[in-house]
Image (cartoon, rainbow, N blue to C red):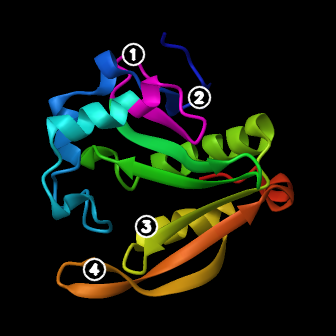
Amino acid sequence: MHYLLYQNNLIKIVPFERNKYLTEKYRSWFNDPETTRYNSWGLFPYTKGQMEDFISIIEKGSTTKIVWAICLNDAHEKHIGNVSLQGINLHNHSAELAIVIGEATARGKGFGLQACQLVLNHGFNKIGLNRIWTGTAATNIPMQKVCEKLGMRQEGIFREGIFLNGEYVDVYAYGILKKEWEGISNVKP
């Protein structure tokens, strides 16, 4: 079942589907040093088995994880990345935001910010979350800028929380509450 979740002039986010998005091109993103330079995805090869495990969780209808494909909103609907809410905790009304822009030509164009805006709206207004958070390496300046533009606050630092490129790097934790989002949800990229 393929249906539109949200869109704006440039992108749309739709449910991640096995037959449409689970491709070798998709798998290559997680084996690309540039795509994985700010996270631990690239430590080991991303295999077909791991792709199958990933899609199995989604197809089972997990209540703790929702993954959307980010596609260009044009005639080709090119898949450029994924965005998700994971670790959804309905008791505490919280979730973690995660995003990857795998298509190198789509980076730095504001698509990630737009996708995160659409997902924050969904999390707060459809799921009823009160808090959405994310963590990012201290070296990941682009993600830090996205967090700031979304109105997220830096809430803490996990000192030397990740080992990247031969060194320990701090991880910055960012979060936003529903009441804060309601005050700024008209943020533009």
Q: CA distance from mark 3 to mark 1?
A: 28 Å
Q: Is residue 162 visible?
A: yes
Give me the disc on residue 163.
Answer: 4
Sort mark 1 into few (<14), some (14-19) or many (20+) by Cα contacts within 10 Å.
few
Residue lying farthest top?
Answer: 1
Q: CA distance from mark 4 to mark 1?
A: 41 Å
Residue 71 pos. (x, y %): 42, 30
Q: Which residue is mark 2?
A: 7
Residue 165 pos. (x, y %): 19, 78
Residue pictured at 56% horizontal, 74% vertical:
173
- CB atoms of marks 3 and 2 within 8 Å: no
Helix, strand or loop for disc 2: strand
Marks 4, 1: nearer the viewer: 4
Give me the disc on residue 142.
Answer: 3
The part of the image, by quadrant, that contains residue 103 is top left
State the extent of the magenta-drawn residues as a range: 57-78
Give the residue type that dot 2 points to.
Answer: Gln
Give the residue type that dot 4 points to.
Answer: Phe
Left or right position of 103 against 155: left
Residue pictured at 54% horizontal, 14% vertical:
3
Marks 2, 1: nearer the viewer: 2
Left or right position of 63 against 45: right
Give me the disc on residue 75.
Answer: 1
**43 to 83, vertically: above or below:** below
